Image (tube, rainbow, N blue to C red):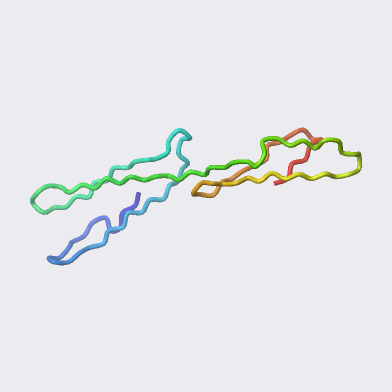
Amino acid sequence: MTIKPCSGVVQPNKSQSVQFIWSPATLRASNRVQETEHTLLQIVDGVADKRIEIETVLPLAKCVLSHKSMDFGAVAVGTEHTKRVQLRNNGHIQAVFRVTLVPSDVCVYP
């Protein structure tokens, strides 16, 4: 969490904009939907400290496949048969995917 400016003076009958900038640097654990940070915004006015709680939510990528399996049936040697699967991201952020290494006699294309 970055706060700009981190200190200052507000003149009578004026206002001051304070930016709270949150830029996640690490992935959250898969079992946590949100992260909460507590930041103290202290106002020195002779009364009591004013506090602000900042809640940050990391959006999810939610992917589904159009098919759970594929059956190529009989394919003659020397011919090619192509099937496609749609990977749909119903989430709020980009989803990154990769194809895991499979036996050398099988080719997988993105």
Q: Nearer the viewer, residue 91 or 106?
A: 91
Image spot of residue 19 (x, y percent): 31, 57
Tell me the quarter of the picture where residue 82 sits: top right
Q: Nearer the viewer, residue 55 or 26?
A: 55
Q: In the displayed structure, does residue 57 sit left or right of residue 88?
A: left
Q: In the displayed structure, does residue 24 sit left or right of residue 12?
A: right
Image spot of residue 42 (x, y percent): 19, 50
Judge whether 76 appears above or below 6 on screen.
Answer: above
Image spot of residue 91 (x, y percent): 51, 46
Image spot of residue 73 (x, y percent): 82, 35
Judge whether 11 appears above or below 31 on screen.
Answer: below
Tell me the quarter of the picture where residue 11 sits: bottom left
At horizontal 39% and vertical 45% (from top left) the residue drawn is: 57
At horizontal 43% and vertical 44% (from top left) the residue drawn is: 58
Q: Nearer the viewer, residue 42 or 86?
A: 86
At horizontal 66% and vertical 46% (from top left) the residue drawn is: 86
User: How many labels sit on residues?
Assistant: 0
Tell me the quarter of the picture where residue 64 sits: top right
Q: In the displayed structure, does residue 61 sit left or right of residue 83?
A: left
At horizontal 30% and vertical 46% (from top left) the residue drawn is: 54
Q: In the displayed structure, does residue 81 sit left or right of residue 63?
A: right
Q: Nearer the viewer, residue 73 or 27?
A: 73
